[in-house]
Image (cartoon, helix red, strand yellow):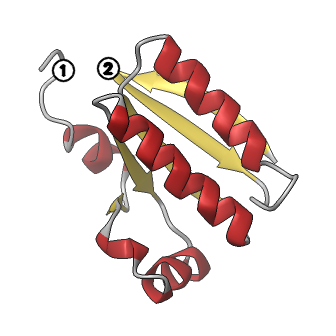
Amino acid sequence: MQIHQRQVGDVMIIDVVGKMTLGEGDELLRDKVNSLIQQGHRKLVLNLAEVPYIDSAGLGEIVRTYTTVSRQGGALKLLSLTKRIQDLLSITKLLTVFETYESEAEAVKSFGPAGV
């Protein structure tokens, strides 16, 4: 799994590429998000468009990431869920927890005006 980050306004987009499974990305995501929070980023969008598969460890890491960001006064939103991931979040009732978006522009806009 690979993680790339890019900034759009005051929102940090985290592009995840590859499977999110135990030992194959769950710790990578945790480290990346902790690093971003320490740098003062509180508006995060997790782009899952290139993630073909998430196991329970990967799902747990997304939930842990959400909790970590929320505790720091920030927000984590999910972008471009595949059908498989959307079904997984639906089955686990996590779709009610996360804000999900189809387009990056909508996700970024959902945080409100920059600097607020």
Q: Nearer the viewer, residue 78 or 74?
A: 74
Outermost residue to the right: 23
In the rendered view, would you say 107 is above or below 84?
above
The mark found on residue 33 in the picture is none
- Mark 1, Cα crowd under 10 Å, few <14 / some 14-19 / many 20+, is few
Coordinates of residue 39 in the picture (x, y in percent): 49, 10
Type of amino acid at the residue the image marks with label 1: Ala
Image check: 73 left or right of 66?
A: left
Coordinates of residue 116 in the picture (x, y in percent): 12, 20
> Which residue is tagged 1?
114
User: Who's the residue at 83% across and 59% down the image?
Assistant: 22
In the rendered view, would you say 28 is above or below 9?
below
Image check: 27 left or right of 66?
A: right
Coordinates of residue 65 in the picture (x, y in percent): 52, 45
Image check: 66 left or right of 108?
A: right
Coordinates of residue 12 in the picture (x, y in percent): 44, 28
Question: Mark 1 touching mark 2, by CB under 8 A?
Answer: yes
Element type at marker 1?
loop
Q: Would you identify the image quadrant in which residue 27 lies? A: top right
In the rendered view, would you say 41 is above or below 101?
above
Type of amino acid at the residue the image marks with label 2: Asp
User: Who's the residue at 55% across and 37% down the image?
Assistant: 14
In space, the residues marked 1 and 2 are separated at their CA atoms by: 6 Å
User: Who's the residue at 57% across and 75% down the image?
Assistant: 85
Q: Nearer the viewer, residue 58 or 101?
A: 58
> Which residue is tagged 2?
10
